[in-house]
Image: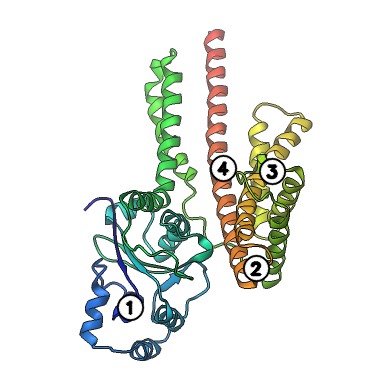
Amino acid sequence: MPPFFMKARFYLPGGDNSYKNIAHIVYIGTRPGVDRGDADIGDRYFEKFKIDSPAGHVKYAAERPRSHGLFGADEKPLDIKQVMEELKQHDGIVWRFVLSLREDTAKRMGYIDRKSWEDALRASVSEAAGAMGIPESNLRWVAAYHAEAGHPHVHLVIWEKEAQRRRGVLSDGERKDVRKAFIKSFYAAERSRLGVEKTALRDMIRDVARGEMDRAHDLVVRIKSARQEVRAMEGGTTGVAPRLSDSDREDLARRVENLAKIMPGKGRVALKYMPEEVKAEAREIADWLLAKPGFAASSGRYKEIAREMAGHYTSQDQRLNQAEENAYNDLRDRVAQLVLKTAAQVQKRGPDKAGRDYSFSLAGNLWRNVWHAIEKARSREEARGEMEKRAQDEKRMRRREKEKEQER
């Protein structure tokens, strides 16, 4: 089995397929750990229990309160009966995916519990659906994690809110892009770790090759130490985002809607290309987010790290303050870019037609995306700071050693 495995099937509307889709939802949601990764297993469950109406599935699920393991785009718990009813009424295609990792790969990368898989899917499903031509605004999905020995996996079910796509089969290009979207999310931390470790080792080997071959043992020690810090560069799991209150959700949705109204209707959605008025508004929203409880501590620490790293080279308050300000501006603009992308989604539908539920949903997604971005940036800067501190300590140690040799 390859380190990452993806299987995809589709079910056209009509016939028994709506009931089979409902049966599949019930099965993956209420029987965690039993499924072996077969995307057809829901159909056999349908045949086994001879359920000829959605009412039978509703009764089965209702008799097992809180027993299902379904999750979706939002962290809010799902009502399995509502999902089943929605699929019953759905008149479009339903896609089923099985995404699996080898157990050794899952352990190495930290995918050992439901939350880690939830985070990976929430970071990738919208991009994968986009590769299928399904925009996030028209996307619905649910999934369930099965901690199967040897190959932990998730069952993912995707459909459109309003049926538009008429072709169920994925082209070779679409399948490749969908797979790439999932791999990019699952392996993001691993790629970051390997890339930074490669750079760190290259730089240290280069330094030693410049005439310090007698410090080979020290190089080994430094490499081991660097590897420990490089692992921190991936940040691990960013945890659950701070709770978004109803008032903040409403405020954030309103701010994003107002931004959408003044954004250009065409062109690249990038902060640096936006008119000054749009830049200012996006940055104001970013400032508002970064000042929120839960976010403020991480953004504050990000600035502190920049100041500490600058302190390795200067003690002038003006330069230290400037380093801190530059770090904050960099982080704020990263957040502002996320804000712009969310506003672009509102604009695409039309700010006045987006609707309260749609805007609120986007506000929740933006809140979580900002949290993940801040936490990853902070953890990376902390690791960089530790590596820089060690490098400065070693320079001072070498300087003292040379001074002692000269005194002799």
Residue 14: mark in rendering: 1
Q: Residue 287: give x, y in percent of width and height.
A: 72, 52
- Residue at numbered disc 2: 353
The three-letter code of the residue at mark 2 reads Lys
Determine the secondary structure under disc 2.
loop
Q: Is residue 211 above or below residue 68?
A: above
Which residue corresponds to mark 4? 382
Q: Amino acid at mark 3?
A: Met
Residue beneath the point at 53% across and 13% down: 402
For the residues marked 4 and 1, what is the alpha-carbon distance in whole angstroms?
A: 55 Å
* 10 Å crowding of disc 1: few (<14), some (14-19), many (20+): few
Residue holding disc 3: 274
Q: Are the residues flagged by discs 2 and 1 in contact, CB closer than 8 Å?
A: no
Kindly indicate whether the residue at mark 4 contacts the one at mark 2 (C-beta within 8 angstroms): no
Q: CA distance from mark 2 to mark 4?
A: 43 Å
Helix, strand or loop for disc 1: loop
- Asked if residue 346 can be seen in this view, the reply is yes
Residues under labels 3 and 1: Cα distance? 47 Å
* Mark 2–mark 1 distance (CA, rounded to whole Å): 31 Å
Specify which label sits upstream in the sequence, 2 or 1: 1
Distance from Cα at disc 3 to Cα at disc 2: 24 Å
